[in-house]
Image (cartoon, coloured by chain):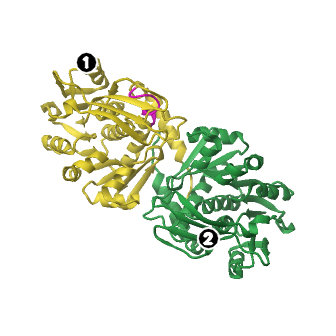
Chain colours: A green, B yellow
Amino acid sequence: MSLVVVGTVAFDAIETPFGKTDKIIGGAATYSGTSAAYFTKNIKLVSVVGDDFPLDMIGEFKRMGMATDGLQIKNGQKTFFWSGRYHVDMNTRDTLDTQLNVLLDFDPVIPDSYQDCEFLMLSNLMPQLQKKVIERIHKRPKLIVMDTMNFWMETQWDALMDTIKLVDVLTVNDSEARQLTHEYSLVKAAQKILRMGPKYLIIKKGEHGALLFHKDQVFFAPALPLEDVFDPTGAGDSFAGGFIGYLAQTRDVSFGNMKRGIIYGSAMASFCVEKFGLERLIALKQDEIDERVQEFVDLVQFDIALV
Amino acid sequence: MSLVVVGTVAFDAIETPFGKTDKIIGGAATYSGTSAAYFTKNIKLVSVVGDDFPLDMIGEFKRMGMATDGLQIKNGQKTFFWSGRYHVDMNTRDTLDTQLNVLLDFDPVIPDSYQDCEFLMLSNLMPQLQKKVIERIHKRPKLIVMDTMNFWMETQWDALMDTIKLVDVLTVNDSEARQLTHEYSLVKAAQKILRMGPKYLIIKKGEHGALLFHKDQVFFAPALPLEDVFDPTGAGDSFAGGFIGYLAQTRDVSFGNMKRGIIYGSAMASFCVEKFGLERLIALKQDEIDERVQEFVDLVQFDIALV
């Protein structure tokens, strides 16, 4: 079995109230894959970069346990680039520049060696490309998790709806859940989204935690209160990567195990935001992850025994 | 032993996206006392109203278990009146009208029968009046909980600081915690506030739950995801009333018991917002409260056993 991670591998340039970076490695699949690699070593990457992308980093992906046969390198073309500036609240940001480059005509290739895919992470990407990946994997994976964003709701509504109905778990943030349903109440929004196809919905609320909905069940995971959020870039992708990585490791897709997966995902996101870019996420030790998860346990545990 | 609840008893007129009310009964002490009365019957009210206040309601306070010897009725004067309009997000509101009336020269009286006070709830009020109450209770209560608001930070800073340092537990909302400390990070804000005197700090985040800080410990309680928040008026006071009511009932002021108290307080707040004003809060049955608390348990419980 394997975990296939699809999405962007990119360059980012980021400004936050704490400072700014030059071009650094980013991208949804980069964060998701790096986070998942702490849980399972059989990860297979589907993405595209230009020949300006450092080969060192591709070596690093392999070292972390990611196969890169599905990572296309386009000669004479440039890697996707995004630049943004976060506001003081760290929840809102302005996009300063987007250069699609290799993404413009990206056609995801699924190598034969990827056909054992049991867990599929569709990180944020054009919904029609996410759908192509689902179609190109011959045997339906045990679990398909899809992330998306407001931009596709505004520009690719029909393609988004076509893709959403094929997945098991959809992850969106709170404002995207509202935008997708025209409901302010997240409970009502969740009910509507679950009728669009996904069996599970995760609503990410940033510093306010995350909600998991399934039928009439709901689970809430807090975010860890942090002294400083240094750079939120990649937090949602690290969350999703930790979530599906934990499920792939344990090979258990029950609601109870998804709750644990959300705690692990939240722990990974809490590391991601502590430094710029991948810096913190790429250099974690297992005992740091265990300690962080214990902080989540301590944060919310209380004992009320009702009869 | 008794629980003394100090604060406003008022008329409110409320507009929300769901409708509007004429003058209805409100006030911080009304909500706190009503909420606490589900946990302990030895409650003693300190407040002031005009002779326009319905005697029926004072009878209702007594029926709920509140002594009203400390509730002054000022002949020829009018009860405090507040009117406000909530925005669509229900987290922000505009004050349309404030008529202080009897509050203008309110001098809180502590009857002799109140001197057995063991738990003291200082609901939102001018900080110098909150301080007077502390001074007029001869034997220092086992636990003093104080609520306050941004208005006093802007107009009564010194009096506020003088009062804050006398209490055990301070409750503020997230924006007030930031305003009090000029720190955006709630973790840093909490550290500063705990240095101002209180041993415990509760930061209320509305629909995003509540945080309890004590020394290096932190506990997070979620808010229940609701289909609709009908009217947020009194939610914070119902929360505080449930919290101190539960502590008074159990006579246990340990950190572990405060965590339980916060869950009970959160449950009471979740009822409060389901209808306008006191309507829902005043008519609860014990098994509804138990069921609601069980929903909180189900909402956050997960089993991760780390070695």
Tell me: residue B201, above or below residue A51.
Answer: above
Q: Main secondary structure of the magenta part?
A: loop
Q: Secondary structure at mark 2?
A: strand
Location of residue A154 in the rendering, given as x and y in whole percent from the top left corner: 67, 49
From the viewer's perspective, is the residue at label 1 or at label 2 nearer? 2
Q: Which mark is residue A12?
A: 2
Give whichever of A250, A13 is nearer the camera.
A13
Location of residue B153 in the rendering, given as x and y in whole percent from the top left corner: 27, 50
Q: Marks 1 and 2, how far apart in space?
A: 67 Å
Q: Is residue A113 a member of the stretch shown in magenta? A: no
Location of residue B196 in the rendering, given as x and y in whole percent from the top left corner: 25, 58
Question: Numbered disc 1: what chain?
Answer: B
Amino acid type, callout 1: Leu
- What range is drawn magenta here? B270-278
Location of residue A247 in the rendering, given as x and y in whole percent from the top left corner: 68, 58
Tell me: residue B81, above or below residue A229.
Answer: above
Q: Is residue B275 a member of the stretch shown in magenta? A: yes
Q: Which mark is residue B55?
A: 1
Same chain for the residues at labels 1 and 2, yes or no? no
